[in-house]
Amino acid sequence: MDLKPALQIQTTIKAMVDVVLPAIDPNNKIAQEQARLVVGMLNLLAERQPLTYRYDRDELSRFLSLAHTLHSQAEDVAGTEEARHALAASIDAGADVLDRARAEPSELESANFDLRERIGALITAMYAAADEAKLRHVSATALGHAREQSLRERSWLIGQGWEQDPEAIPAIEALIGAGARKAGTRAIDKSRPSRRWIENLRRRFPCEREIDRVLTRKLERRAGPEYSPVGLETLCQGIEALLRSQLEDPFEILDPRWQTGGASKVQVEFTLRWTQPGAGRATTPMVLRMEPSESIVETSRRREFQLLKAFQGVVPAPPVFWLDAEGRFLPYPAMISGFVRGGTKPSTGSSGPSGVGIRFDPVARPILGRRFVQHLAAIHVFDWHGADLSAFDVPQPGTQAPEWQLNWWERVWEEDCNEDVPLMRLAASWLRAHLPPADRITVVHGDYRTGNFLYTEDDHRITAILDWELGHLGDRHEDLAWTLKPSWGHLAEDGPTFLANGLMPENQFLDSYQAASGLSVDRRKLDFYRVFNAYKNVVIVLASSYRVPRGGKGHQDVMLAWLVGLGTIMLDDLRGLLQDLT
């Protein structure tokens, strides 16, 4: 008899719990965390593997229903003929697969892939050609399907622990009926993208030159080797080579060690004994921040370095020392900054990966909240014109700022997603139809939230704003909407009050921001960027967090695969926002 997957998973879990976890050095926090994530992932696989075939059949049935409705709604819409014809063919093929009791799992997957793509193409075509009344019907149809799909996917992944109220989610058995794409049928091999496909994406989604460069570099290298773990000794040799190119006096690298956290970048702490310009002999704690082979947020170390340097003395930001923008000395592009004292969460608290779910003490909230708002206001009123931001393009007045951002993230979705999601097509079309003009171009941090600042618990002082890699010049409302995302906050002790970033209610946050910055808040722009940020979040979590571990390109692949489960909740957030606005 062959060894069934369920038994393989069961024995692997036992080995992890009984042998591997107890043997891991308790001081190696990153190894401890990833081992626990492995056990959690295996438990989820063991629970869901017997239901996978039924789940896929139910999904195909639902997509066929959606496809029939949309095909009917598009019958009298000029310009959609090609998309309707293609969708009709996929409907026939999908119905054939569903009708055959012995259909292979790969046939189900193939039919689902086809229908997703054809439905998405029809939605895009209708958005370009239909009148407003027709679009309301299309949106209602797509959003209704997305609501059901999100509920199924949230139930499927409930074992990961993302849900705040798991009892409110029906069991997956109650949501699926009783009951892939064939090899070689996909037109694009995203693991080995062609030059023609890359160039087509560049033409379709024009964005800033530096963003275009790093995204193009990502795709050009994707077919290359997987990420190979780099030892501390090798990294120290790279650091030493970089420093020798910059320093004349002798120096010494001491006590190198891995830094926990940072799902997208490799980080190493060390101490440098050196002659610091203007200060003499010094012993300085530092941090190396380096890209893996491919990141869930593929960004430019040069841009991050320039922003950190520009904001020294403006807001708490780690001092920056050296940059290896092209990976000349180190295995991948990297920079070296100063180490800053503080933590991202209370020492007695807990949180999920990437800072999700942090809860601050009620006494600390008003102090941290006030400082959190003041620093965001300082970023937005900063006069960036005199700073060295040569790696940034300045958007023209009007809608170019949001258009560049939408192009950036829609391009990443096309590059990284494994399967089309009609809701994402609808969201991109809606965003492109509602681009708001920016009344003021400011520095946008891009990821300003709980988990991305350090603070000291004894005095509640924010010691550093972290993770500037997504920073750009754009509309301040993008940052404001990002800080208000449900993912970063939680309900207060009274039950109904939602605390943005776990610090203060939304209205209080916005009022405090306007008072601190002197800048107004446009609620319509805020709504646009709520949708945009929800879209961007889904791209990162559902597309890139899948693509990186699929190719073995990251340094924390098991964490990224685990994070994909959060995408179902983020998709439902996106659906809810569009439901309210359409």
Image (cartoon, rainbow, N blue to C red):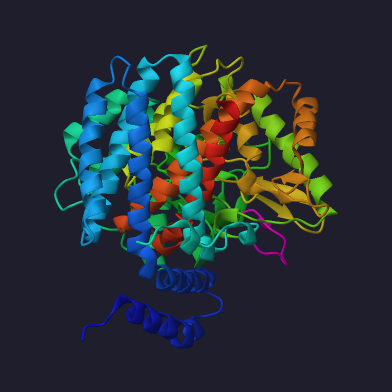
Q: Residue at x 52, y 38 (%)?
A: 575
> Exactly how many numbered labels are in the figure?
0
Q: Residue at x 33, y 37 (%)?
A: 414
Where's residue 229, x and y in %?
35, 64
**Residue sitting nearer the eye, 262 or 45:** 45
Q: Quadrant of residue 387?
A: top right
Q: Is residue 212 above or below residue 229?
A: above
Q: Main secondary structure of the magenta part?
A: loop
**Residue sitting nearer the eye, 404 or 109:** 109
Quarter of the image with the N terminus is bottom left
Where's residue 504, x and y in %?
78, 43
Quarter of the image with the C terminus is top right
Q: Residue at x 22, y 57 (%)?
A: 106
Q: Is residue 277 magenta-colored? A: no
Where's residue 324, x and y in %?
40, 45
Where's residue 332, x and y in %?
35, 50
Magenta span: 339-351
Decide if residue 190 is in sight here. no
Question: On the picture, is 295 further left or further right than 192?
Answer: right
